[in-house]
Image: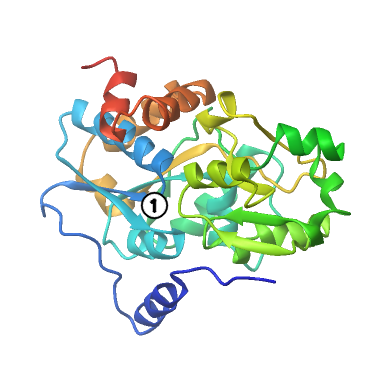
Amino acid sequence: MRRRPRGLLGVLLLALVVACGGTPEAPAAPADAIRFASYDFPENQILVEVYAEAARRAGLPVSVQHGIGTREVVSPALQQGVVDVVVDYLGTATLFARPAFPDLPGTPEGMHAVLARTLGGRGVLVLDVARAEDQNGFAVTTQFAAANGIGSLSDLRPLARRIAFGGPPECPDRPLCLEGLEQVYGLDFGEVLAMPSRAATVEALLSGDIQVGLLETTDARLAVAPVMLLVDDLGLQPRENVVPLVRKDAADRWDGLTEALDETSALLTTSDLVQLNRAVELDGLTPREAAMRWWGSD
């Protein structure tokens, strides 16, 4: 039985505002600064801090607005000029920008070209992709995997109706989450629970409240908790390289902005992303502190 994601009313209200020609609101920021905005999960907040620090080091004025919301909120805010810079993930960003064309190119280069053409007409530049990549992953405990002889998502098919799934509130309507698991793998879980955080997802897996949960492939808890990611054997997840999206008018106004962000993408690796997540998830640093550690500053 499906539980609808919390926060749906807010998304619908935003859609009405946008449809009526309004602009989604974000927290107040200095008028004379480049406005970086993050999604509502820790890794993206860390990435925004990493890229914002690059702009600061280029001598540019920066403001950071964390946890603005889900993609349904942040993407319109970027396109309508409420914020200037968003750090996104290539495959998901492309699917969201082109929902009527769900078939994605198989390479980062192909997806980048599609996304750049699509967002270019909306006043947004798609900068260079990083080597760093983070995909949706679906985790079970090692005990559950051993007891049921499973290692891939396809192995869940005969079990799905008897087990519970946990993921973020928006997961049921996302093509790379429950919607995709149903369409690609034929998985229809007996119960779906909304998880407030990835930490809560791990706790629910270990307590047995859920048997399958969404965790990103760069989640640091995968290295310390008795959980494992199931193999995406039918290739549901696209390439998800980190990619900055920048308002064209902000890029035109602030000399050196795109260069600073592209130089950062050239440095950032998946291993870096895991370590950044570990710094916040396990070591207790703030996203800003983790970013400064990555940059080699106290």
Residue 30: in sight, yes or no? yes
Judge from the rendering whether residue 211 lies leftward or rightward of residue 221; answer left or right.
right
Give coordinates of residue 233: x percent, y percent. 82, 40
Give coordinates of residue 168: x percent, y percent. 53, 56
Rendered-image quadrant of the N terminus: bottom right
Query: Residue at position x 39%, y 74% from top?
Result: 10
Q: Residues within 10 Å of mark 1 (few under 14, many from 20)?
A: some
Give coordinates of residue 120: x percent, y percent. 45, 56
Give coordinates of residue 32: x percent, y percent. 10, 50
Nearer to me, 97 or 2 = 2
Query: Residue at position x 34%, y 58% from top?
Result: 78
Task: Name the residue carrying label 1.
Answer: 40
Judge from the rendering whether residue 254 lies leftward or rightward of residue 21; answer left or right.
left
Residue type at tag 1: Asp
Depicted 246 relative to depicted 172: above or below: above
Query: Residue at position x 87%, y 36% from top?
Result: 149
Depicted 127 relative to depicted 50: above or below: below
Judge from the rendering whether residue 20 lies leftward or rightward of residue 72; answer left or right.
left
